[in-house]
Image (cartoon, helix red, strand yellow):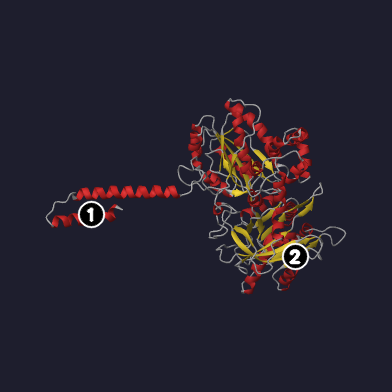
C-alpha cells in the first residue's frame, strides 16, 4: 500500500518546491508517514474482516491428516512434549491393526507408560534411533500381513527402510504383534520379518512376537498376548501396574446445532464436498462416483444370487489392468441405522463432532466431523461387524440390570467360560451391536459412545472381471449376494452386496457408487505366447474372465497367444454356471481350453481339485516343460490349499523331484511371478 501512495506524496512535495514554498514535510517524512498510514489501514481492515467472520468453536478437519512438515511428523517431539514413553505403530489395511494399537496405547496408562498411536506413513521413522534417549521408552508394532505376504500400504516405506538400510538400533526397546490369516500361504510374514530384523539391527526385544490368526479368533490371540505382554514390560522396566483397569473415553462429544449446512460431512471420505466437486486423482481418500451401466443376474436358479455389474469410469483418469481390484465404499442398511438410533434413544439428525482428547494425536476425529449420527452410522461405521471384547466391556457400564452387566463383562474377560460364552453368544450367533442391544434390554449406551467404539466402515474389494484393452472406460464386477439366517433366527445381509443389489440403473437417473482402483500383482505374462493355467471356481472366475478377454483381443489383432486352460467349478450347470455362453464362445474360437466341475450334478461331488489330479501330464507340460504361469482365485481355506498340495504332488511325480524340491520349485515360481494367488477366506 505504501508503494502505491508514495509517488502521489512525492509529486506533491515537488510541486510545492516548484512554487518556491518550503513544504511542511520533507520527502523522507512523507515516505515514512505513507508507510504508517498504509500499515494502520491494513490493520484496521484486517480486524474488521475478522469481526465479520463467524466465530467457530471448532476447526473442521478431514478424518486423516497427512502430516509432512518436519515438526508435525516428529513422534519423538510429541513424546517428549507430552511426557510419554510408549509409541504404538500400526500397519493396517482394514482397521484392525490400528484398533489393536489404540487399545495398547490406552492401556499403557495402567502401567505408568503413557502412550500414543502412530501411523508409520506419517512419521519420520529414522527417529527410532532417538527413542532410546527417552527413559523407559518402548516401541510396539501392530503389523498386518496383506496380499502375497506384503506389508500394508501405510507400513511399506518403514518395511523397506529396515530391509534395505543398515541402521544401528541398539538401545531401542520393542515388541511386535502380527495380524494374519493361517489359510494364506504367507501367514504373518511381515510381523515375523520385522521382529527378526529389528533384533538384527541391534534393538532389544522386550517381549516375544505375538501372532494373531484372523481365520480363528484374532481377538482372543491379541488379548492372550497382551495379557502376558504387560507383566513382561513391567518386569523389564521395574515398574508396577496401577491395578484395576479404568475405562477412559478417547473422544469428547461436541454437539454443533449451529454449524452451517455446507460445513457438515454427508458421507465424504476425507475432503468436504468431494462427492459434489469431483476432481482427480481418485484413490482411497478421494473415490470416484462411478455410474452403474449394467446390473444383471448371472444365476439361472437355485435361490442364490450373483450379480454382473458394469461401472463406467470414463473421465476419471483411472486406469486398470486385468487382475486389478476395484474397491467400493458401501453404505449400511437404513433400517439397521434407524433401529440403532431407537435403541440408544437418539435423534439421528443431531449434528455433532467427536474430538480426540489427546491433542497430540494426528487423528483428531474417528471419522469426518462435524456430521450427523445418521451419516456416521450410514457411511462411516461398521455396524454389522461382530463386536470385539473391548466393546462389550464398555457397553456393560450402561446396563441397569446387574445380570446383563455381568453377562457382558464375563464375555469380555479372559476366563475360559467367558471366552466360550463370547464364542457361542456373539461369534457363532453372528450378533452385531444392534442385536446385542436388542437382546440385552437394560443396556442403553449414549449413541456418541457407540460411534466411538465401532470400527470404521471399510471399502470392499472385488477382482475386476474385465480387460481394459476391450473395456477401457468400464470396470466389470462379479459379486455373490451375501444373505444368511443366523442361529437366533435373524437374517444377516452383506453390507456391500446388499447395497449393490439395490443399485439398479432403471429410468432416467444415473445410479452411482464411490470407487477407486487398487493395483495388483495378479498379472498375465508379459509375453502373450506364454501358456497359462487358471483355477477359479465360482466367482473365482472373475479375474480370469478379464484374462481371457485380453487374450481373445490379442488373437483378434493377429498376435500369437499361448494356450489358456481354465478350471471352473460350481454347484449345478443349470443354476450357477456364470458366463457360460462367453466361455463356450472362447472355446469355439480356440482361445480357451475349458475344464468344468459341477459338484452337485452327480451323486459323488466333483471339484476342480479332482480335475487337476486327473490332468497331471497337462499341468506338468505347461508349468514344467513350457515354463507357463499358474493362477488360483477363490477360497483360501480349502480350495487354494488343496490345489497347492496337488500341484506339489504333480511336480514331485512328473518332474522326478523330492517333495522338498517340489516345494522349492513352487516357491521359485512365486518369486518369478509364475505362480499367483488372489484368494480370500
**Pointer 2 local density, CA inside 10 Å: few below 14, some 14–19, many at least 20:** many
**Pointer 1 local density, CA inside 10 Å: few below 14, some 14–19, many at least 20:** some
Q: Is residue 544 left or right of residue 22?
A: right
Front in this rendered view, residue 174 or 275: 275
Mark number for residue 376? none
Q: Position of residue 229 (x, y in %)?
A: 64, 32
Can residue 658 be seen here?
A: no
Front in this rendered view, residue 633 or 106: 106
- Residue appearing at x 36%, y 47% in the figure: 43
Q: Is residue 627 above or below residue 356?
A: below
Q: Position of residue 392 (x, y in %)?
A: 71, 38
Q: Position of residue 551 (x, y in %)?
A: 65, 68
Secondary structure of the residue carrying numbered label 1: helix
Number of numbered discs on residues = 2
Q: Position of residue 597 (x, y in %)?
A: 79, 62
Q: Is residue 69 above or below residue 517?
A: above
Q: Name the image quarter holding residue 223.
A: top right
Q: Which residue is mark 1?
A: 9
Front in this rendered view, residue 295 or 208: 295
Mark nearer the N terminus (1 vs 2):
1
Which residue lies most toward the left here?
20
Q: Which residue is mark 2?
A: 298
- Residue appearing at x 55%, y 57% in the figure: 274
Nearer to us of marks 1 and 2 is 1
Q: Is residue 609 left or right of residue 505?
A: right
Distance Cα–Cα, label 1 vs label 2: 83 Å
Q: Label 2 near label 1: C-beta < 8 Å?
A: no
Secondary structure of the residue carrying numbered label 2: loop
Can residue 618 be seen here?
A: yes
Q: Is residue 502 left or right of residue 600?
A: left
Front in this rendered view, residue 657 or 263: 263
Amino acid at each position: 500500500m505504501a508503494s502505491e501512495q508514495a509517488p502521489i506524496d512525492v509529486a506533491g512535495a515537488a510541486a510545492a518546491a516548484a512554487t518556491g514554498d518550503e513544504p511542511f514535510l520533507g520527502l523522507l517524512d512523507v515516505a515514512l508517514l505513507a508507510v504508517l498510514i498504509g500499515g494502520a489501514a491494513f490493520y484496521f481492515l484486517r480486524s474488521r474482516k475478522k469481526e465479520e467472520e463467524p466465530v467457530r468453536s471448532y476447526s473442521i478437519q478431514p478424518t486423516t491428516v497427512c502430516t509432512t512438515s518436519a515438526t508435525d511428523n516428529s513422534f519423538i517431539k510429541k513424546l517428549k512434549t507430552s511426557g510419554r514413553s510408549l509409541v504404538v505403530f500400526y500397519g493396517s489395511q482394514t482397521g484392525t491393526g490400528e484398533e489393536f494399537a489404540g487399545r495398547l496405547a490406552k492401556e499403557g496408562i495402567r502401567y505408568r507408560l503413557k502412550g500414543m498411536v502412530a501411523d508409520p506413513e506419517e512419521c519420520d521413522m529414522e527417529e527410532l534411533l532417538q527413542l532410546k534417549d527417552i527413559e523407559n521408552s518402548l516401541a510396539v508394532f501392530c503389523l498386518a500381513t496383506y496380499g502375497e505376504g506384503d506389508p500394508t500400504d501405510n507400513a511399506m516405506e518403514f518395511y523397506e527402510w529396515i530391509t534395505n538400510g543398515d541402521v544401528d538400533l541398539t538401545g531401542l526397546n520393542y515388541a511386535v504383534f502380527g495380524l494374519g490369516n493361517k489359510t494364506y500361504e504367507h501367514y504373518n510374514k511381515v510381523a515375523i520379518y520385522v521382529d527378526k530384523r529389528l533384533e538384527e539391527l541391534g534393538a532389544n526385544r522386550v517381549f516375544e512376537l505375538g501372532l494373531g490368526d484372523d481365520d480363528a479368533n484374532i481377538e482372543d490371540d491379541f488379548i492372550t498376548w497382551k495379557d502376558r505382554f504387560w507383566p513382561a514390560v513391567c518386569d523389564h522396566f521395574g515398574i508396577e501396574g496401577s491395578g484395576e483397569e479404568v475405562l477412559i473415553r478417547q473422544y469428547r462429544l461436541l454437539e454443533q446445532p449451529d454449524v452451517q449446512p455446507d460445513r457438515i460431512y454427508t458421507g465424504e471420505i476425507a475432503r468436504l464436498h468431494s462427492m459434489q466437486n469431483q476432481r482427480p486423482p481418485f484413490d482411497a481418500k478421494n473415490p470416484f462416483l462411478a455410474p452403474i451401466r449394467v446390473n444383471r443376474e448371472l444365476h439361472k436358479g437355485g435361490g442364490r444370487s450373483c450379480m454382473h455389474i458394469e461401472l463406467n469410469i470414463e473421465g476419471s483418469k483411472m486406469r486398470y489392468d486385468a487382475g486389478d481390484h476395484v474397491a467400493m465404499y458401501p453404505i449400511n442398511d437404513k433400517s439397521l441405522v434407524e433401529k440403532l438410533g431407537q435403541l440408544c434413544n437418539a435423534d439421528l439428525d443431531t449434528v455433532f463432532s467427536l474430538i480426540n482428547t489427546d491433542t497430540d494425536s494426528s487423528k483428531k476425529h474417528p471419522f469426518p466431523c462435524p456430521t450427523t449420527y445418521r451419516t456416521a452410522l450410514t457411511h462411516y461405521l461398521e455396524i454389522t461387524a461382530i463386536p470385539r471384547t473391548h466393546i462389550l466391556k464398555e457397553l456393560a457400564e450402561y446396563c441397569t440390570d446387574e445380570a446383563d452387566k455381568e453377562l457382558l463383562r464375563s464375555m469380555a474377560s479372559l476366563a475360559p467360560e467367558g471366552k466360550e460364552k463370547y464364542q457361542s453368544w456373539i461369534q457363532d450367533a453372528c450378533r452385531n451391536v444392534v442385536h446385542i442391544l436388542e437382546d440385552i434390554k437394560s443396556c442403553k449406551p449414549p449413541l456418541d459412545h457407540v460411534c466411538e467404539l465401532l470400527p470404521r466402515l471399510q471399502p470392499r474389494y472385488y477382482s475386476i472381471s474385465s480387460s481394459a484393452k476391450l473395456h477401457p472406460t468400464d470396470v466389470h464386477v462379479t459379486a455373490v449376494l451375501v444373505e444368511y439366517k443366523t442361529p437366533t433366527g435373524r437374517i444377516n445381509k452383506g453390507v456391500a452386496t446388499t447395497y449393490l443389489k439395490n443399485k439398479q440403473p432403471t429410468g432416467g437417473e444415473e445410479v452411482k457408487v464411490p470407487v477407486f482402483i487398487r493395483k495388483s500383482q495378479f498379472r498375465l505374462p508379459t509375453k502373450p505366447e506364454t501358456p497359462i493355467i487358471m483355477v477359479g471356481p465360482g466367482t473365482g472366475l472373475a479375474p480370469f474372465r478379464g484374462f481371457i478377454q485380453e487374450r481373445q483381443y490379442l488373437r483378434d489383432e493377429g498376435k500369437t497367444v499361448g494356450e489358456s486352460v481354465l478350471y471352473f467349478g460350481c454347484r449345478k450347470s443349470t443354476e450357477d454356471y456364470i458366463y457360460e455362453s462367453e466361455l463356450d464362445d472362447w472355446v469355439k474360437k480356440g482361445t480357451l481350453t475349458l475344464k468344468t466341475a459341477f459338484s452337485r450334478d452327480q451323486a459323488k461331488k466333483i471339484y476342480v481339485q479332482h480335475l487337476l489330479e486327473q490332468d497331471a501330464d497337462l499341468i506338468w507340460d505347461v508349468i514344467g516343460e513350457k515354463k507357463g504361469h499358474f493362477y488360483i482365485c477363490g477360497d483360501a481355506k480349502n480350495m487354494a490349499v488343496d490345489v497347492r498340495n496337488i500341484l506339489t504332488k504333480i511336480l514331485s511325480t512328473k518332474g522326478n523331484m523330492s517333495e522338498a524340491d517340489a516345494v522349492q520349485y513352487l516357491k521359485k515360481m512365486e518369486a518369478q511371478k509364475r505362480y499367483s494367488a488372489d484368494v480370500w477366506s
